[in-house]
Image (cartoon, rainbow, N blue to C red):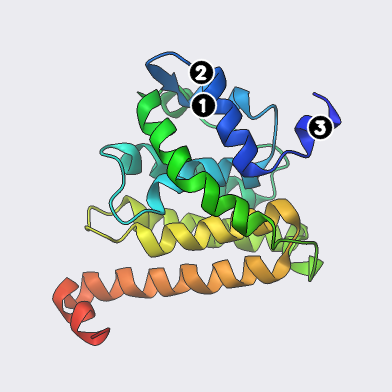
Amino acid sequence: MNETEDNRAASQVLEDAVEKHQADLISVEELIVALHGRGFGLLLVIFVLPNCIPIPAPGLTSITAMPLFFLGYQMLLGHDHPWLPNWISQKKFRRSQLASLVTKASPKLKKIETLLKPRFLAASSAMGERMIGALCLTLAGCIALPIPGSHFVPGVGILAMALGLLSRDGITIMIGALIGLLGFCMTLGILIFGAGAIESFFG
């Protein structure tokens, strides 16, 4: 792996992964291999993106919730390298779904990436990564719930934390954490009071 590949932005890695895999079906393992050994941050971006659109591609949310759970758990434990069990890594999804997702998300990611820079480095330290892992673990549980719309705000929170982690941007990580906590509170509110009560609260 050369330095240029190491320094590619998340949006560029996603575009390259879609370009290199022309088969109708892509396994999670093939996608991970396409990342060239990149760490937790980029894997979080890959698996949370389907949850960051209001109406995700059918089936993608259920496939991505478990990897997010495992990645969050490993970050919480302080692992250096991500790992996924075979029953997750062998799952497959359609290339057309990934291509459509990347086409929609890539322009927005590129705009966000131009704003990211190293700052407030404590949030991306080893202890910071553990805290990100704990929150991702919780938010993955929200995403996995069969509640329409419950994936979106937690997903955006994880995405912001992951992009902040990749760029060591502590401010973005903290913004993502706040969004994630809002998503958790909304999901909890739906479970307790019902979706109608939450919609009425937000007017």
Q: Residue furthest top?
A: 23
Is residue 31 visible from the viewing direction of this image? Answer: no
Q: Quadrant of the N terminus?
A: top right
Q: CA distance from mark 1 to mark 3?
A: 18 Å
Element under label 3?
helix
Q: Which mark is residue 4?
A: 3
Verify CB contact (< 8 Å) between mark 3 and mark 2: no
> Could you tell me which secondary element the residue under label 1 belongs to?
helix
Q: Determine whether the residue tagged by mark 2 lies in a helix, strand or loop.
A: loop
Question: Could you tell me if the residues under marks 1 and 2 are in contact, i.e. CB atoms within 8 Å?
Answer: yes
Q: Which mark is residue 21?
A: 2
x, y percent for residue 151? 34, 57
Give the residue pinned by disc 1.
Answer: 18
> Residue at image x 70%, y 35%?
38
Q: Residue 185's image quarter?
A: bottom left
How crowded is the residue under tag 3: few (<14 C-alpha within 10 Å), some, or many (20+)? few
